[in-house]
Image (spheres, helix red, strand yellow):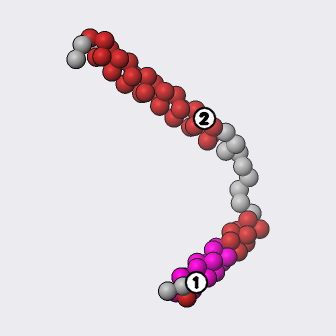
Amino acid sequence: MNLNQIVNMVMRTLMRKGINWGINKGTQVLSRRGTTAPPPTAADHAHSAQAREAAKRARKAAAITRRLGR
């Protein structure tokens, strides 16, 4: 292994760490934006309950379909 290969390996490692750091920082900044959302209302809770029920029915339907397909 010559010096050029060692330098390239070190530079790739440093660049990878630097780019990953930048990407992580950017995603953290973007995820913090818009944290001023209003608290959930009773209607939001009702909607999520309906969504849970719909998901439960879909899981049951999928299980029945799998059983009938055997």
Q: Position of residue 26 (x, y in %)?
A: 58, 32
The three-letter code of the residue at mark 1 reads Thr
Is residue 31 at all visible to an observer of this figure? yes
Residue 65's mark?
1
**Residue for badge 2:** 29
Residue 21: image x %, image y %? 47, 29
Point out residue 63 in the picture as x, y percentages from the top left corner: 54, 82
Identified at 73% across, 65% down, the residue is 44
The part of the chain drawn in magenta is: 52-67
Mark pair 1, 2: CA separation: 44 Å
Residue found 71% across the figure and 56% down from its top:
39
Q: How many marks?
A: 2
66 falls in the magenta region:
yes
Residue pictured at 57% horizontal, 37% vertical: 27
- Please indicate whether residue 40 sits to the left or right of residue 18 in the image: right
Note whether 69 is above or below 31 in the view shown. Answer: below
Residue closest to the eye, 58 or 49: 58
Q: Secondary structure at mark 1?
A: helix
| Identity of the residue drawn at 42% across and 27% down | 17
Q: Nearer the viewer, residue 67 or 52?
A: 67
Residue type at mark 2: give it. Val
Q: Residues within 10 Å of mark 2 (few under 14, many from 20)?
A: few
20 relative to 5, above or below: below
Which residue is at the far right? 43
Foreground residue, 65 or 15? 65
Q: Which one is earlier in the sequence, the residue at label 1 or at label 2? A: 2
Q: Which is nearer the eye, 43 or 10? A: 10
Residue at the farthest top position = 3
In this picture, residue 2 sits left or right of residue 63: left
SS assignment at label 2: helix
